[in-house]
Amino acid sequence: MTPRFSLLMCNYNKGRYIDDAIRSVLAQTFADWELIIVDDASSDDSPDRIKAYLSDPRIRFYARDMNCGYTRSLIFGLSKVSSGIVGIIDSDDALVPQAVEKVFDVHTDRPDVGVVLSQGYRCGPNLEPLYVFAGHRTEPLLWLKGGTHFRTFKLAAYNKTSGFDPRILHAEDWDLVVKLEEVAPAYRIPEPLYMYRFLSDSVSQAPETHMRGFRSLALALYAAHLRRLHTTLPKMPRPAVLAWTVAAVEYSLDLKEPWRALVFALRGLRVLPSTPASWRTLAKVASACLRLSATRAGKNNSDFDIIRAYPVRGMRVGTGNVEPDRVVCIPLVHREGYCFQAGEYFVPQTGQYSVSFEISIEPYSFAENPLVILDVYDNLQTSSVLAERRIGLEDLAGRPRSFNIEFHAMEGQRLEFRIYWKEQCFLSATKVVLRKA
């Protein structure tokens, strides 16, 4: 008999964790499922571990001879599913026992819905829940409010889209759900049904992977902007789309790939050609390209020490004017307060860190210290400031554009990087960069 629900799991060298993932499927209260496991040419003991479960006829295993990447493995796995409803589980994560039952009920009760998501648990290395990362239930998925787990969809809806895009690396989940939202309604269950295991040594947590992932997400959002441009579908505001393309420029420059940065800068011009931010970004990229051509120098991609970079995209503000490439605070126009709150970085390892705030400050002649207060805040474990730097007039000699804080952070803390503006200066903030000290 054809199963009523298909689960797709793609694996590469996650042998230490795949037992937990498979067992969580076996423990489901809804039993009429099939599990398709695609191994992408793992070099660890993953295949042997998977084979131990093949006595269950609901589990089917496909081992690939050559590593093709996660997105291509998903495309291959989708070609093997038997049912009309598909859910994706990563091989180092797990499902709560009622997960499949609850999403299947929604799919059945709401035949018009194309994609069903849930809330999720952020878990430690041993799948111990740390906190719930919640997603909004009524806002469009395009607005990126929340995570993409537990992502399930009707195959009929998927077939109306262009499907997974192999160009989108480490952001294929958002690319997919945004496309699905364009062909059918989406629904998010208000309960956490997915257990996301945070691993500090995961490929997805590597700095280069992180930057390439957010750059891919910027590409996916730009493509969604073009698809939805002349439709009645919900749209991301053009300044927000431009902010993402500017962020992709920043990530490309951090990766020492100025020519890719140039492509995104030109995309930004297409989104908002009359906005100064578009031209400032293009000028910045042109300068970077000229410097690289003149010196033929620069670090190799794998040599940078950046852990995370936070351009203006994705940050929160309490005061100031948010532009696509910066936030600006003007005395007598804006009120005193936090003009930059970015980060949400989950600390994987206790140690010394360094954060750089890229800001420019133009004080009044009668300004009083401090002009600006920079801090690092733990918003999970201690709800306290871990480190702080007060910027005064004496710090502005030579017109610096970057101010650093070194600090100690403990494993499990969640960091937020903040700028408090005291209404004593003109301020422009563009980016925060976190490094391992």
Image (cartoon, rainbow, N blue to C red):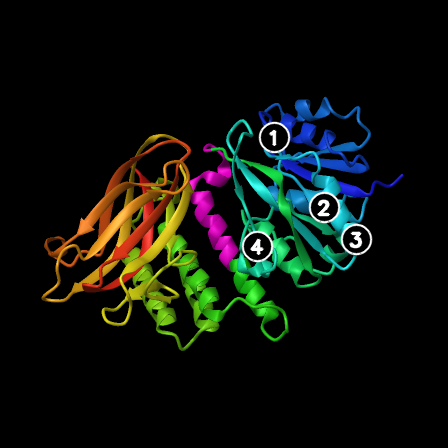
* Amino acid type of the residue tagged 1 in the rendering: Ser
Residue denoted by label 4: 136
Q: Are marks 4 and 2 in contact (CB under 8 Å)?
A: no
| Residue lying at 76% horizontally and 42% vertically, measured from the top left | 6
Residue denoted by label 2: 103
Q: Which residues are magenta?
A: 200-218
Residue denoted by label 3: 109
| Residue lying at 40% horizontally and 56% vertically, measured from the top left | 315
Q: CA distance from mark 2 to mark 3?
A: 10 Å
Residue 42 has which mark? 1
Mark nearest the camera among 1 and 2 is 2
- Which secondary structure dominates the residues rendered in magenta? helix
Of helix, strand and loop, which one carries label 4?
A: loop
> Could you classify mark 2 by the number of other residues whose Cα lies within 10 Å: few (under 14), some (14-19), or many (20 or more)?
many
Estimate the x, y position of residue 396 in percent, counting from the top left: 14, 56
Q: CA distance from mark 4 to mark 1?
A: 36 Å
